[in-house]
Image (cartoon, rainbow, N blue to C red):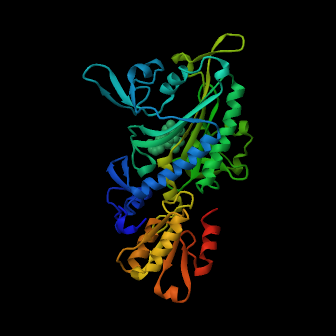
Amino acid sequence: MLQSQLFVKTRREDPKDEVAKNAKLLIRAGYIHKELAGAYSLLPLGLKTLNKINAIIRDEMNKLGANEIQMTALQSADLWQKTDRWSDDKVDNWFKTSLKAGGDLGLGFTHEEPITVIASESINSYKDLPLSIYQIQTKFRNEARAKSGIMRGREFLMKDLYSFHADANSLDEFYLKAQEAYKNVFARLGIGDKTFVTFAGGGSFSEFSHEYQTICETGEDTIYLDRAKKIAVNKEVYNEEVLTKLGLDKTKMEEVKAVEVGNIFKLGTRFSEPLGLLFSDEKGERRPVIMGCYGIGPSRLLGLLTEVFADEQGLIWPLSVAPFQLHLISLEKNDEALKLYDELTKKGIEVLIDDRDLSAGAKFADADLLGVPYRVVVSAKGLSAGQYEIKNRQTGETDFVPVEEFPAWVEKTIRL
Ligand code: ATP
Ligand code: MG
């Protein structure tokens, strides 16, 4: 893409009404626009990055054999009354409205209820199980504190996967596979080494749920971490009894701040029973379906990646989610740079070319702020020496690559 045509406005100053690093930087870099506290619009670069996060999650969910759907945000009170999750004293973060024609609606803060009803229309026998269905969809929660920028939205994106089983063994088996898929997602997002399975409060069906917590100084959660075992316990359930049960040693546990990027949960029959999701087993007996649910927060991840990777100069994206793979900086607006841009684009490399009539300093400052992983400078001086100057945004290292070796460099670096 030509930067002269990109809809983006970078700023040197932090917005005054934001305290979170992620919101300050994403707004300065022109990735997002603040609509109101806890609600952000995605501008082209923000949307591209979020779409890449979604693509990784989608790929791993599809590999699990899950079906993608999209449910409605609008939810009817009648349905949620059946599971006792409508009243304010049960769930305090609904956005609700009353219809003039009668009846109450809310904007879904999660989707166990509607997915259970949808599943009940197709599940009848044990032969229909197991089944897994997911969506990547907007959720609404009237969060009391919306100070963590895009990491705690009142309107945010969630990937929610639901699984349906005939028995607990089948759920356990799928749950383990889902854990593998989650591990892959976080590794591909570049935070595999910072993200830990964390034991947290469960429910009636299982003693614990598993959160995926990424170490981050500005995180709202506190976890206790055994680095050697790669296991953590959320402070909310942390006590001697839990440690003993998990075979963890208190003296080895390190207290760290973290961000919950995912949460997986065994639901059992919590929703299938009240909503009548039944199946006939091999003996023809009607039994409630056993369920699991598996969440990840893509928009929270966009903020988290900002928090953990950005530096003083601006954003830094892992190659896997960067809005562009290469940032070509054309100095003196030369034709060689445009020619190179065409060649790379034809090869399917995602290139942003700074073709604007600006000083080198201004272009470099913008490039640092936008955070594309590799910056390739095409200048008259470099060309006369037969080379391009390449800067790795993450390490800050600069390389001079001979023009004829550049295609090989691209193959090695970009096509992993
Ligand atoms: P938290 O404890 O941070 O409020 P939660 O436990 O209520 O989160 P879940 O209901 O488990 O969240 O939702 C699944 C995932 O959705 C979370 O792991 C998180 O990644 C994401 N998520 C939840 N709430 C928000 C929010 N307000 N803004 C952005 N992402 C969110
Ligand atoms: Mg959670």
Image position, residue 59 (x, y; %): 59, 46
Q: Quadrant of residue 203?
A: top right
In this view, the residue farthest toward the right is 247
In this view, the residue farthest toward the left is 100
341 or 55, which lies in front?
341
Tell me if 57 is positioned left or right of 102 in this view: right
Image position, residue 50 (x, y; %): 48, 51
Tell me if 348 is positioned left or right of 145 in this view: right
Whether 185 is drawn above or below 334: the answer is above
304 or 201, which lies in front?
304
Image position, residue 400 (x, y; %): 58, 81
226 or 323, which lies in front?
323
Tell me if 124 is positioned left or right of 368 in this view: right
Q: Which residue occupies 69% across, 22% down? A: 167
Q: Which residue occupies 52% across, 89% down? A: 384
State which quarter of the image contains the N terminus: bottom left
Q: Quadrant of residue 8?
A: bottom left
Tell me if 148 is positioned left or right of 309 in this view: left
Q: Is residue 59 visible?
A: yes
Q: Which residue occupies 44% across, 46% down? A: 152
Whether 304 is drawn above or below 414: the answer is above
Q: Which residue occupies 37% across, 61% down? A: 30
385 or 170, which lies in front?
385
Q: Is residue 327 visible?
A: no
